[in-house]
Amino acid sequence: MLGPYSQKLTADDHRELLNQLYLARYFDVRLIKEKKRGRLRGTLYSSHNQEAILVGSLYGLKPNDWISPIHRDMPAFFLKDFRNGWRNPGRMGMTIQEVCAQVWGKQGSPGRARDNWSHIGSKAKHIIHSTSMLAGTIPAAAGVVYADRLDGGDAVVLTYNGEGSTAQGVFHEAVNFAAVHRLPVVTIIENNQWAYGTPTDMEYSLEDFARRADGYGIPGLIADGQNVFDVYEKVMEAVDFARSGKGPSIVECKTFRAYGHGDHDDDRAAKYRPTDEVAQGRSRDPIAVMKRLMVAAGTMTADQSKEHPAEGKGAAEVTDADFPPVVVEYLTEGVEFAVNDTVPPGEEGGMWVFRE
Amino acid sequence: MAATAEAPQSTKKNYLTALKEALYEEMAANSDMVCIGEDIGILGGAFGVTDGLQEKYGRERVIDAPISEAAIVGVACGMCVNGKTTMVEMQFIDFISCGFDQIVNFTATYHYRTAGEVAIPMVIRGPAGGYGGGALYHSQMNEAWFANSPGLKIVCPSTPRDAKGLLKSALRDPNPILFYEMKELYRQRAIEEEVPEGDAALVPLGKAAVRQEGEDVTIVTYGTNVYMCLEAAKTLEAEGFRAEVIDIRSLVPLDEETILESLKKTNRLVVVNEAPRTCGFAGEILARLAQEAFEYLDAPPVRVTRLDTPVPWVKPLETFVLPSVDKITEAALRVCRY
């Protein structure tokens, strides 16, 4: 049962969405493999099993809209405005070279590798620069669209947050501020059930987090975070609501963190989380769900759905042959660029404290 | 109010009026400037610094914010990311701790972590300082928290001219700036003075002012303490010592040059500030000058600060912990007679 927004998606959209899911997944597993090969250092924060949230939420945005991703949203940096051409340098998203250069800590990073992992952004591409202080970007997101509205714009901002960060005081302050001023802020909660090592029943006392929205007098929507159509549907509902001047929303996307908080935590996460819970949480791979939906919609045959069987596989089991070649080629361009790029000179560590 | 044509009206202004003028002038000159804070619009601010501003510039540009210091700072920072200049009022500078992370981790680092892509032209201003019986949470000078956070400039005017001139300069600077206003000086008649209009009022950041010249001891200070140091200088003079009183006005950046030049002449240093002793800014000035001017010093440099205590409420207690004219005089005499 598709909603009004998803119904309008064409067969081409379906194929594009599936490829984006594959790309987000491939980004994740390729980095793990690069690290195992010794070509990459640093902690990786996996979006494995949560890709439908990124792909589905970004797909309907206008180029000028803003986003504010966090550590588990690394693919969002290049998926933004992806419909305007994966390799189109003029689109309002980062290139794969820029994102990979950041992962590798090289000069080609948009932030010249001054802070690690997802702590990048681009004023030019309308991506807010995050820090490690989760939920701390929501006030800035509200400020960005406040300024845009003053200038007569109609941009919307999507902020991404784990359910864990919603217990921060700044989450409340920022969502309340956005509600009071009816700002076009769509707060996406990637509810993956675990805040590092803490389960949701130790984080908040609601059955559905989305109900928190009632307290702010704003809509709270719930999406199946494994289903790209459902995420697209609910986020577009919130985006249109926001763009029409009615104000912010919370969209809770229910999902499950497939592995550790970061790759350093994979082994421990296998112990602190019940085995059956993990098996259950991984059982609805968003790529598999998407294929089933496409077969049902007639945009893919049952035979075609057996091609590129990346779904349900971890980084250790999956190979490049499990992914469509367009996806492997695209990311490889970024990886090779980053590996061959140079690190910034040391003296840059003392630069840019102030604008002169 | 029947002022006769013959009696010339005084054009002297107090510190608070000077601040207000700066805001009105900069709001008029910069249509991209937005003000945000608690009770700054309808009420006109707890002390009236933003009085009438919302009426003139509207609710969109002069925002009455919920009691949410973290959101206030963060929202202002987001506006700056998207092309605005922002003035954030902290109702009392003591409350700034509620927005601390947004200031030191989010805003102060923005230009650095974006490799210069994004500048944050933001001024966070608010009433600060003791001597008014404001007790623990309405008396603080917490500038050292921010001096220890790279990426923030810190300003503290002591006169109406500087209040206006430095605030105007701060609002034109592309960096986040903490602007400490001395609430004890807001309406003090004794310091009222003529204050220029428009660009003539501008006072550059990072430049100290020599409030009194002298040859025997250099007293470095800022804020309300400037007047105590000038008062102490009178007693010193009676004792035969002429003090040079330097008002640094900007802590970050600090005008070390002016202090150093003075020390070459006086060879003696006393630093005074209201903040507690340990890791306070007075200690930073002492450390820098001890390193730069060791050969010029004829006596160990001394600082006069608040005790390492909170600021208590009732007068005898407050007086006990804060710097006073007596404490400054005593310290300076000790240095002079060393």
Image (tube, rainbow, N blue to C red):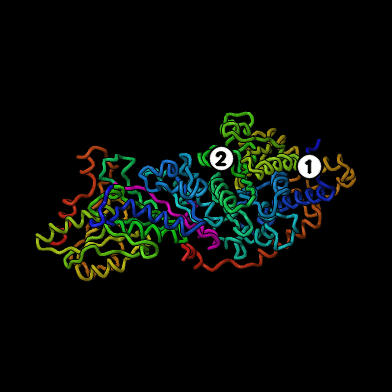
Q: Tell me which label, 2 or 1, sits earlier in the chain.
A: 1
Looking at the image, residue B199 sits to the left or right of residue B15; the answer is: right
Q: Are marks 2 and 1 in contact (CB under 8 Å)?
A: no
Q: Which mark is residue B98?
A: none
As drawn, the residue found furthest toward the left would be: B239
> What secondary structure is marked by label 1?
helix
Pointer 1 residue = A6
Residue at which label 2 appears: A175
Q: Can residue A215 be seen at all in this image of the molecule?
A: yes
Q: In front here: A333 or A90?
A: A90
Under mark 2, the amino acid is Val
Query: Which quarter of the rendering shows the N terminus of chain A?
Result: top right
- Horizontally, residue B41 falls left or right of residue B251, namely right
Q: Position of residue A281 (x, y in %)?
A: 70, 36
**Residue nearest the observer in this picture, B179 or B202:** B202
Based on the picture, tell me whether residue B26 belongs to the magenta stretch. no
Q: Nearer the viewer, residue A286 or B125?
A: B125
The reply to whether the magenta stretch includes residue B110 is yes
Asked whether the residues under marks 2 and 1 belong to the same chain, the reply is yes
- Which segment did they paint magenta? B105-129
The residue shown at (28%, 64%) is: B209
Asked if one can make out residue B285 in the rendered structure from this viewpoint, the answer is no
Q: On the image, which quarter does residue A95 sit in?
A: bottom right
The chain ID associated with circle 2 is A
x, y (%) of residue B235?
Answer: 12, 57
- From the top left corner, tell me how far across and down residue B136 is, in percent: 31, 40
At x 55%, y 44%, the residue is A135
Amino acid type assigned to the residue bearing label 1 in the image: Ser
Q: Chain of mark 1?
A: A
Q: Residue A63: image x %, image y %?
A: 69, 54
What element does badge 2 sit on?
A: helix
Q: Name above or below for residue A213 compared with residue A77.
A: above
